[in-house]
């Protein structure tokens, strides 16, 4: 059975408590430094013939706003923020481990120079492009519709790559390869076409910048083995944790955002995650009225024996 550990605390503080060389795969999806407030509205839908949403079989539903989640995605010195965390990632990787850094066009080129300096240029293996086609477009430039994922190996040439575990994709011109190959599909290249998390889909947690399970699960299956230990220290909605738990891996997830921790606890309830709160965060994490109400009543203290 997979073991999932959720650590509540500033990730650099938590990382420094973890032993070196213990993780076979580290995937992080840090803030992209967009300079904007990232916000997602949480909705619930109810059946309503006059509703604003159209569902299956022509049935209509009405949306009800039940809350929102947001955070500021802006750093005055982004590389200074990333550097000590990538240094820790290098320390924590096992000798045959892989590190995946998920960013976008704004910072990926600067981050690659930084990661090259920490891991060594020879340890850089691939840049994966996750391409999607969703959202608004601009008439001022080519609309950016992709993310960048940098893959580094702890030691050049020594890493896990279970290519047969990758989900196969259809040929773009199936008639040119024959019926047998077309039916089997092909292995992906370094460009991955995959939809974002659907705003109305079952996978959506309501957490800002949630990444699709399909993208992270491909990384988990190909770049680790059953029983391996995985780490995500910008855990957010816990996508790596779900991918690990569903595929027989163990995972350590780190985040200091109470909203993220709440989402992860609900999302990963099937895996029975263990919660660890960094000592300095105990006083900061004061219980809400809801959590106080959910706690069992205290039993009266037993009289001391004399």
Image (spheres, rainbow, N blue to C red):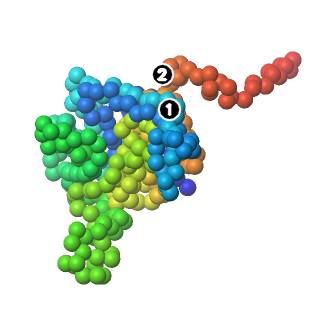
Q: SS of the residue at dot 1? A: strand
The CA distance from mark 2 to mark 1 is 34 Å
Q: Earlier in the sequence, mark 2 or mark 1?
A: 1
- The residue sitting at 50% across, 19% down in the picture is 284
Residue 197 seen from this side: yes
Q: Which mark is residue 65?
A: 1
Residue 207, placed above or below residue 287: below
The structure residue drawn at horizontal position 45% and vertical position 38%, both measured from the top left corner, is: 206
Residue 111 position in % (x across, y down): 19, 38
Tell me the quadrant of the picture where the N terminus can be found: bottom right
Q: For the residue labelled by badge 2, is the local secondary structure a helix, a strand or a loop?
A: helix
Res. 254 in view: no
76 in relation to 252, above or below: above
Extreme left residue here?
A: 141
Q: Position of residue 100 (x, y in %)?
A: 29, 47
The answer to whether marks 2 and 1 mark residues whose Cβ atoms lie closer than 8 Å is no
The quadrant where residue 179 appears: bottom left
Instruction: Give the quadrant of residue 90.
Output: top left
* Residue occupying the point 22% across, 57% down: 190
- In the rendered image, residue 7, in percent from the top left (x then y), is placed at 48, 35
* Residue bearing the label numbered 2: 280
Q: Can you give x and y, in whole percent of width and height, for residue 227 in the image?
A: 46, 57
For the residue carrying disc 1, how many other residues have a C-alpha within 10 Å: few (<14), some (14-19), or many (20+)?
A: few
Q: Residues within 10 Å of mark 2 (few under 14, many from 20)?
A: few
Q: Is label 2 or label 1 in front?
A: 1
């Amino acid at each position: 059975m997979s073991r999932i550990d959720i650590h509540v605390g500033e990730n650099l503080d938590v990382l420094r408590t973890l032993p070196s060389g213990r993780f076979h795969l580290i995937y992080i999806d840090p803030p992209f430094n967009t300079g904007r407030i990232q916000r997602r509205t949480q909705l619930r839908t109810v059946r309503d013939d006059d509703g604003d949403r159209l569902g299956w079989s022509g049935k209509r539903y009405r949306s009800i706003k039940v809350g929102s989640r947001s955070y500021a995605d802006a750093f005055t010195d982004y590389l200074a923020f990333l550097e000590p965390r990538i240094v820790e990632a290098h320390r924590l990787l096992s000798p045959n481990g892989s590190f995946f850094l998920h960013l976008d066009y704004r910072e990926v080129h600067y981050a690659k120079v930084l990661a090259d300096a920490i891991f060594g240029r020879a340890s850089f293996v691939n840049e994966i492009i996750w391409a999607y086609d969703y959202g608004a477009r601009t008439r001022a430039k080519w609309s950016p519709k992709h993310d960048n994922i940098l893959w580094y190996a702890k030691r050049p040439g020594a890493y896990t790559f279970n290519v047969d575990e990758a989900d196969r994709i259809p040929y773009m011109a199936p008639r040119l390869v024959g019926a047998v190959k077309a039916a089997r599909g092909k292995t992906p290249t370094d460009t991955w076409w995959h939809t974002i998390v659907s705003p109305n889909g079952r996978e959506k947690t309501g957490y800002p910048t949630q990444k699709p399970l399909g993208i992270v699960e491909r990384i988990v299956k190909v770049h680790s083995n059953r029983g391996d230990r995985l780490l995500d220290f910008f855990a957010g909605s816990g996508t790596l944790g779900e991918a690990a738990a569903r595929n027989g891996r163990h995972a350590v997830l780190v985040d200091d955002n109470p909203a993220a921790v709440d989402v992860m606890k609900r999302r990963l309830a099937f895996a029975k995650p263990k919660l660890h709160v960094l000592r300095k965060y105990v006083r900061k994490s004061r219980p809400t009225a809801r959590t106080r109400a959910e706690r069992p009543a205290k039993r009266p203290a037993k009289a001391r024996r004399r």
